[in-house]
Image: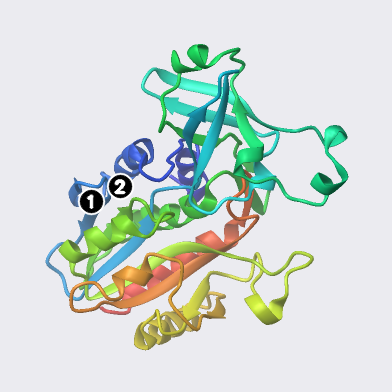
Amino acid sequence: MSCREILRKLTSVRGVSGHEQEVAAVFCELTSPYAERLRTDVLGSVSGSVNSGGSPRILLECHLDEVGYIVRYISPDGLIYLQPSGTQSLDAAIAQRALVKTEHGPVYGVIGTKPRHLLSAQELTQKPGITEIWLDIGAGSAEEVRQRVDLGDPVSLVSEFYDLGARVSAPALDNRAGMTAVVESAAQLSGEKLKAEVSFLAAVQEEIGMRGAEAASVKLCPDIALVLDVCHTSDTPGIDKRVLGDVRLGGGPVLVRGPNTDYKTFRRLKDAAAEADIPVQIQASAGVTSTDAAFMQVSGGGTASGIIALPIRYMHTPNEILEWNDLENAVKLIKQFILSFN
C-alpha cells in the first residue's frame, strides 16, 4: 500500500481527543501484518514492534487524535454550543459542515454564526468567540436535539481528501501524516534484517496535553524515540521567517534542534540524510516543543529523543496541505537512520 493509500484511509475517519477508537482501529489494521505484540493500553494508545529483542530499542511515535469540539450545551431553540478540544481556529469553522459522532450513529450539521449583514460596527472589528458560533443540525427544539445528540459527544469538521498532484489537501494531516510515515516505515523495516528493535506507538490525546504518550512511554522504555508530527510552514504571506524560521513545502522533513531533542540523535538523523541524499530542513526550538517529545524525553530515566516534523500549511483547519515528497522522504530518513545501527 502506497503512502497515498495509507493517508487516504487514515484521513477518512475522525478522532477528536478522547474519541480516537476509529482511528486506532485503522492504525491496527494497517500495522498488523508487520507488528509483533500489537496491543492497546488503557487510554487507547496502540503499540507494537518489529524485530523484538533487538538493540538498541528505537521507538517511532505519532499521535492518533485531531483537534475538534465536544457538545457543551443545547439551547431551547435547538442549537448546539461547543467546547474546543485542542487549539482551534474558530474563523476556519464558520459555515463548515460538521459531524457529531453519537452512540446512535453520525449526525451532520453546519457551524453557524450571526450573518455579517447584521453585525454592528463594533462586532465587525471583532473575531467571534466560542459562544458566537454554534452547530445547527436542523432541529427546532432542544428536545429534538437530545433525541439524537448527547452532551459530551465529539464534533469534527467535515472535509475530503483531495489529491492535488505533488501535494494533497485533507483533514487532520496533523497527525495522520505522521501516522502514515510510521505505518509505511513499519512495512518497509519488516522486510529488513535489523540489529535494532523498532517499536511504534500511536498515542491518544496529544492535542490536549500529550497525555497518551506520557502514560505509554513509561511502559515502553525505549533507548531512542523519534517523534513523527507536523509543523507550520513559513512559505505563505504574512508569516515572519525571523520568528518561525524558514520552513517550506517540498524542502524535506524538518529536524528539530534544541533542548527538547537529543543532540546525538539529531546529528545522526542529519548524517543519515546526508548519506542517503535526502533533503531535510532544520528548525531551532529554544524550549519544550508542543509535541509528544515534551514528555517522552523525560519519561522514566530519560529518552534520547528526536523530532521529524512534516511541514504543512493551514494547521488545525479542515483543509491542511502537505507535499508528498516530504512524506516520502521522511520514510526514507527513518529507514536510513535505523539501518545505520547495523
Residue 177 placement (x, y as % from top left): 49, 54
Does residue 246 appear in this view? no
Residue 251 vs 320, above or below: the answer is below
Name the residue carrying label 1: 35
Q: Residues within 10 Å of mark 1 (few under 14, many from 20)?
A: many
Which quadrant would residue 338 be assigned to in this image? Answer: bottom left
Above-or-below relation of 256 to 102: below
Q: Position of residue 331 (x, y in %)?
A: 44, 63
Between 113 and 333, the residue placed more toward the observer is: 113
Task: Judge from the rendering whether residue 269 lies leftward or rightward of residue 316; answer left or right.
Answer: left
In the image, is residue 206 above or below residue 301?
above
Residue 35 or residue 169, whichever sits in front = 169
* Type of the residue with mark 1: Ala
Regarding mark 2 in the picture, which secondary structure is present there?
helix
* Residue 104, numbered circle: none
Q: Is residue 330 left or right of residue 163?
A: left
Image coords of residue 137 (percent x, y): 59, 20
Q: Position of residue 227 (x, y in %)?
A: 38, 67
| Front residue (pair 169, 21) | 21
Residue plotted at (33% across, 64% down):
60
Residue at left offset 69%, top offset 38%: 94
User: Whole-Å distance between the Cαs marked 1 and 2?
Assistant: 6 Å
* Labelled pair 1, 2 in contact (Cβ < 8 Å): yes
Which quarter shows the N terminus?
A: top left
Q: Residue 31 — which label?
A: 2
Give the vertical position of 147 relative to 295 (above or below): above
Other residues around mark 2 within 10 Å, as few (<14) / some (14–19) / many (≥20): many
Q: Which quadrant does the C terminus fall into?
A: bottom left
Q: Amino acid at mark 2?
A: Thr
Q: Callout 1: helix, strand or loop?
A: loop
